[in-house]
Image: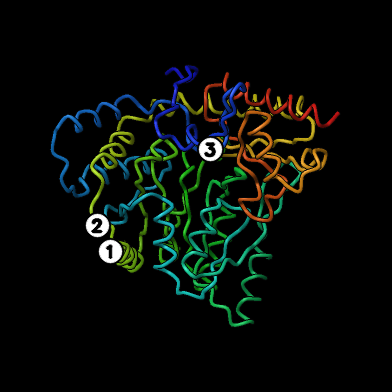
């Protein structure tokens, strides 16, 4: 597969490429921000979409049986999890699905436990639905791994119970976005034990589960049948096969009571039928995309390693950490923020886009624990990534003296 060719995405309506700062006489901004990839999706999947598009009628479509069969095969082959056929439900995009879960498993005024920093739509999904975030700050260890303490989680839950605060739900992501931590089995077990003890549903976003760079591999929350009455996984093929614009997701709920509640939540949200092209894309990506993914993953890891090495060797004021999963680098730019005289990473990222002509995602979007950080998307041709980092280096060097 060719991952080195730069595909022109300008003028396609791409959020990543068509919303950038424009300045006559200056180079176009290189976007290393929003988490979609600049690689063509698996060709077999593209062909299947084109074949269906050639049929001129696009009426309502039910979820085809092959959609769920392909999902089960993927979970079995990639994660070693043998799911019951009935355990899977389809949904809209993962962010709308997050909101559906919030409304399904909590009531207005409730608090929802969220380890932070975290993917910023978590805040919107909770707060826009009249719930409150109950934060458990993650800690960054010396190797750049974001970690949680079960004792700290329990202290937060115990304190909430003493104050009469209802916490019916825990939401988190695995692998972690933005930090790239891949939670180990014992870490997940400790969280699930607390979910059971404090009567919470644990909803886990596993959208980055196919990008894991650690020897132990990915452990899905769906692989804990003893906690089936506590676990809902929401995920999709969007990150794996670059399908973010097709807005499709799936739920894994191995407990019938949880599944029925999700069905009711989907009905209340008005989600009843599948998007024709979305389900065709997902089914065929899972059926035919494994060889494509097997070639992509080492390329991405090469990008990550090259970027981390370059940042830490050359770029002043920025410290990068190698993620255990995802294709995102979580980099501490607090020294650069201070040297440039900015109040925070928001100002830094704005200046980098307008002056440095490279765009990153500002860390404070992910919560207080992200202040001073930037998130770097490495899922693009290596030449583009390196040019973007060269621009960061030139801008930072001019300000760090």
Q: Identify the mark nearer the N-term, 3 or 2.
A: 3
Residue 16 position in % (x across, y down): 49, 35
Q: Identify the mark nearer the N-term, 3 or 1.
A: 3
Compared across the picture, whether 334 is left or right of 160 comes to: right
For label 2, the SS is: loop
Q: Residue beneath label 2, please?
A: 272
Mark 3: few, some, or many residues within 10 Å (few <14, many ≥20)? Answer: many
Q: Which quadrant holds the C terminus? A: top right
Q: Name the residue under label 3.
A: 212
- For the residues labelled 1 and 2, say whether their Cβ atoms are less than 8 Å apart: yes
Of the pair 286 and 135, the residue shown nearer to us: 135
As displayed, is residue 386 above or below residue 265?
A: above
Q: Mark 1 points at which residue?
A: 267
Q: Is mark 1 on a helix, strand or loop?
A: helix
Distance (Cα) linking label 1 and label 2: 6 Å
The N terminus lies in quadrant: top left
Which residue occupies 73% across, 41% down?
332
Q: Which color scheme did the rendering employ for the protein?
A: rainbow
> Among all residues in the image, which is located at the extreme front?
24
Answer few, some or many: residues within 10 Å of disc 2's Cα (few below 14, many 20 plus, some between 14 and 19): some
Residue occupying image coordinates x 31% and y 30%: 288
Q: Nearer the viewer, mark 3 or mark 1?
A: 1
Question: x%, y% of residue 162?
Answer: 64, 82
């Amino acid at each position: 597969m060719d991952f080195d060719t730069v595909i022109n995405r300008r003028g396609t309506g791409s959020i990543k490429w068509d919303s950038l700062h424009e300045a006559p006489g200056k180079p176009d901004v290189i976007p290393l921000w929003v988490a979609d990839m600049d690689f063509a999706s698996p060709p077999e999947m593209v062909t299947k979409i084109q074949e269906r598009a050639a049929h001129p009628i696009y009426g309502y479509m039910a979820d085809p049986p092959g959609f769920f069969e392909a999902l089960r095969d993927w979970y079995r082959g990639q994660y070693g999890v043998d799911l019951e056929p009935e355990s899977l439900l389809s949904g809209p995009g993962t962010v709308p699905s997050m909101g559906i879960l919030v409304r399904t498993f909590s009531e207005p005024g409730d608090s929802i436990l969220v380890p932070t920093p975290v993917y910023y739509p978590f805040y919107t999904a909770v707060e826009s639905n009249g719930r409150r975030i109950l934060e458990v700050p993650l800690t960054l260890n010396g190797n750049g791994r974001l970690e949680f303490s079960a004792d700290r989680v329990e202290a937060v839950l115990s304190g909430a119970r003493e104050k009469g605060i209802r916490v019916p739900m825990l939401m988190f992501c695995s692998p972690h976005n933005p930090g790239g931590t891949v939670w180990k089995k014992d870490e997940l077990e400790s969280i699930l034990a607390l979910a059971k003890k404090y009567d919470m549903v644990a909803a886990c976003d596993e959208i980055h589960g196919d990008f894991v760079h650690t020897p132990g591999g990915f452990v899905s929350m769906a692989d804990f049948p003893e906690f089936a009455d506590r676990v809902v996984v929401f995920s999709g093929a969007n990150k794996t096969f670059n399908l973010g614009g097709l807005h499709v997701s799936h739920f894994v709920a191995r407990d019938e009571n949880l599944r029925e509640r999700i069905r009711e939540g989907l009905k209340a949200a008005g989600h009843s039928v599948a998007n024709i092209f979305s389900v065709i894309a997902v089914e065929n990506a899972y059926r035919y995309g494994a060889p494509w993914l097997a070639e992509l993953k080492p390329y991405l890891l090469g990008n990550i390693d090259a970027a981390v090495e370059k940042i830490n060797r050359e770029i002043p004021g920025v410290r990068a950490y190698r993620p255990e999963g995802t294709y995102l680098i979580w980099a501490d730019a607090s020294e650069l923020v201070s040297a440039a005289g900015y109040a925070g990473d928001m100002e830094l990222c704005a200046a980098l886009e307008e002056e440095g002509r490279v765009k990153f995602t500002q860390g404070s979007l992910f919560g207080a624990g992200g202040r001073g950080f930037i998130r770097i998307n490495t899922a693009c041709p290596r030449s583009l990534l390196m040019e973007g980092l060269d621009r960061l280096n030139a801008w930072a060097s001019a300000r760090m003296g």
